[in-house]
Image (cartoon, rainbow, N blue to C red):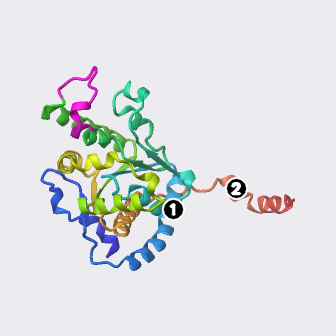
Amino acid sequence: MARKLPGRYMVTDGKSFQLDSVKPDDHGGLDKDEVETWLDKRRQRLGVLQERLAAEHRHSVLLVLQGMDGAGKDSLILNVMTGMNPQGTKVVSFKKPSDIELSHDYLWRVHMAVPSRGQVGVFNRSHYEDVLVARVHADTLNTNGMKGDPKKQEFWDHRLEDIGNFEAYLSRQGIHILKVMLHMSPDCQQERLLRRLNRPDKRWKFDESDLAERKFWPDYQAAYQEAIRATACEHAPWLVVPSNKKWFSRMVVMEALIEKLESLSPEPPPPSPEILKNLERLEAAIKASHP
């Protein structure tokens, strides 16, 4: 059943997508202990596939993670990516743009961070911040040199169109995209923010600005829905995952990532004919080189 779960939340045609069709507290009727046992087992499979992808060096996979503060992006990366070789993975966290980044177009820093062939890349937040946070706070957007008016729908339609074209370009270059929205309820966010505040080991993550953003919850949900509607397609689908239960969202994302890698059927290149011809000599040389 776990392997079929990503299909339940996958959006490959966003035209009629409704965010409220996904219930944040859905957990597929599964049990936490059962799921965590399954995760331990599947990490090994993910690690094998990632190693083959790196050895083949033909494709790359980009996992885009989005979600409201407290949705579980950091812990998902930690739990899902644990079984993968760090040399074959690349995690990029997109914070507030620097002055240098602001002097370029908004996709510049994103393109610079795209994983190279053979890598699994993860964006912790991404180019979608520029149609989410930027849209909710359009009155603060620096439009110096840009065409259009952020107060008008057309501005955001063009930006979403640009993102769709950018992702289509990446897919034609062998970069396979999977976009994830960790969808939680406002009540769940409240519980997690309180937990951050009350646990000394988590207090460092607490940011009072998160409280101010909670007032814009409906605006963010509307912005997410429009972004998914405009950019969900076969080559860059959205996975809208119920995330009130972190263990459940981790399993769904891990299975989706495994499915994506398996669809590429990565295989390491064949060994050099010279190595095959000289196996005995090379084996003897290795043994003779013992210090």
Mark 1 surroundings: few (<14), some (14-19) or many (≥20) residues within 10 A: some
Estimate the x, y position of residue 274 in percent, counting from the top left. 69, 53
Question: Circle 1 is placed at which residue position?
Answer: 82
Residue 220 horizontal side relative to residue 179, left or right: left
Kind of residue indicated by mark 2: Ile
Q: Name the residue under label 2.
A: 275
- Whole-percent x, y for residue 6 in the image: 30, 65
> Tag on residue 93?
none
Q: Is residue 146 magenta?
A: yes
* Quadrant for the C terminus in the image: bottom right
Q: Give the quadrant of the N terminus.
A: bottom left
Separation of marks 1 and 2 at Cα, in angstroms? 33 Å
Does label 1 or label 2 sit earlier along the sequence?
Answer: 1
The answer to which quarter of the image holds residue 280 is: bottom right
Q: Nearer the viewer, residue 161 or 216?
A: 216
Kindly identify the residue that appears in the image at 19 percent across and 53 percent down.
13
Question: In this orientation, which residue lies closer to the viewer: 258 or 57?
Answer: 258
Residue at point 41% right, 79% down? 33
Magenta span dominant secondary structure: loop
Residue 278 left/right relative to 140: right
Could you tell me which secondary element the residue under label 2 belongs to? helix
Please report the residue visible at 54 percent of the width from the left and 57 percent of the height from the top. 268
Give the SS element for disc 1. Answer: loop
Q: Note whether 28 is above or below 134 in the view shown.
A: below
Residue 100 placement (x, y as % from top left): 43, 26
Query: Residue drawn 48% across and 67% down?
Result: 43
Work out whether residue 143 or residue 196 is closer to the camera in this orientation and state it: 196
**Image depth: mark 1 or mark 2 in front:** 1
Q: Give the range drawn in magenta.
A: 134-149
Q: What residue type is labelled 1?
A: Thr
**Residue 46 included in the magenta stretch of the image:** no
Location of residue 224 in the rendering, given as x and y in whole percent from the top left corner: 22, 49
